Structure formats: structure tokens, C-alpha cells
Image (cartoon, rainbow, N blue to C red):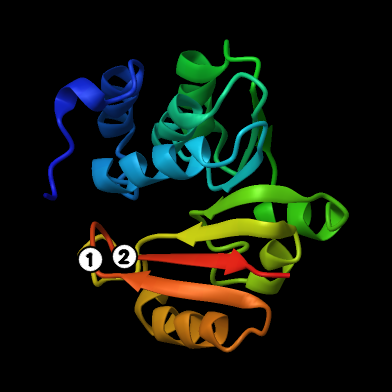
Amino acid sequence: MDKVPDNLFPPALAAIQAETVALGFNMASEPQTGALLRALAASKPAGTLLELGTGTGLSAAWLLEGMDAKSTLLSVDTDPAAQAIAQRHLGHDGRLTLVCEDGAHWLRVNQAARFDLIFADAWPGKFDEPEMALNLLKPGGIYFIDDLLPQANWPEGHAPKVPRLLEWLEAQPGYQTVRLAWASGLMLVVRTG
């Protein structure tokens, strides 16, 4: 149940993975997370999607694969070298906008924006100022996070932030939450009102 069949991978994924390894980027999302992202994107026809933490574009490839022709994905990251990989392999897709900017700054100046799905895969909007990301959700919108189960590649300071974040998210009124002990450890948060 944990394996995603190779024939279900987005077409650009293998090339992005190869460049990700060559770059030494070790915080990329895994295929199970990607497959769930694809399904979540498909559940939002004509949706507006936000990814905080483009990385090399692995998750963006999954999101784009699930999106319909009227959906859009805005992906924000601070690392131009990593994001350049996403640009090379996914930049031709008119549904995708890549922004190379500090995620916390982007969140602060875009509080009027609204999204159907937010994948917070970087500290800004996840461990730092998650309330700013939640504010951007439309009613019925989904906030999705990963990397919640212990991993050898966690950066310093990651481990103590996880339980505090989960408890904070579960205490927020107006949201339904579910923890998933699957893949890297996932959480879905749905805005109910």
C-alpha cells in the first residue's frame, strides 16, 4: 500500500529527481505524498493552489498532474538554484507561477489572496507563522503539511516544532484536522467556515 506504481508518476518527475540528487537537495517530498497531492489538486476544479517551498519542483509536478486546465499553482521558494530545476522542467506549464522570495515576506504582503489548497512544505507558513497561511484558505480549502514523523534528514530545530504545530493546528476553531502516520507524516486541515 505504500508504493506508488512508477507508471503513475508525473512525466517530468524522473528528470527532476535526477537533478535533485545532483544538487544534493535532501528534503524532497516522497512519491506517496506526491500521489496524495495529485488527488487533492484534482478535488479542486478551477482551483487556486499555493505551494510554500517549491524546492526542485517534485511536489509541483504532482500538483500540476492533478490540476485541471483552469486551475493555477503559485509556488514560492527562497532557493534560486533549487527553483531553477522546477523552472527548467515545469516552467512551460502556463498554470504554474514560480516566485523566488522569502515565504514569510510573501505571506505578509499577500494576506488578501485566497486559495483552495495550500501545501506548506517550508518553515514559513508551517512552523513559522502558520496562521498567515491558514488565513489564505477559502471556506472548504485544504492546508496540507508533511515531514511530521522523525527523519534522519531533519534540519536542526525541526523535531521540537512538530508537536507544538500539531497541537496548535488542532486547537484552531473553524477547522477540521486529521493526522496521517503515512509517508513522512502528514496532516490535512480543512477550513469549515
Residue position for label 1: 151
| Residue position for label 2 | 154
Residue 77 pos. (x, y %): 59, 43
Q: What residue is drawn where x is 26% and y is 40%?
A: 31
In which image quadrant can residue 4 be found? Answer: top left
Q: Is residue 93 above or below residue 179?
A: above
- Left or right of 123, for residue 58: left
Percent from the top left, x then y, of residue 72? 66, 30
**Quarter residue 10 falls in:** top left
Q: Does residue 28 appear to the left or right of 137 in the view shown?
A: left
Residue at 60% across, 49% down: 117
The quadrant in which residue 56 appears is: top left
Of 25 and 145, which appears nearest the observer? 145
Amino acid type assigned to the residue bearing label 2 in the image: Trp
Amino acid type at mark 1: Gln
When the figure is inspected, residue 19 is found, relative to residue 74, above or below; the finding is: above
How much space separates mark 2 and mark 1, taking CA atoms?
A: 6 Å
Identify the image quadrant of the C terminus: bottom right
Assess whether mark 1 and mark 2 are in contact (beta carbons under 8 angstroms).
Answer: yes
Residue 79 position, x and y percent, is 55, 40
Query: In the image, residue 90 lies at what x, y percent?
Result: 50, 18
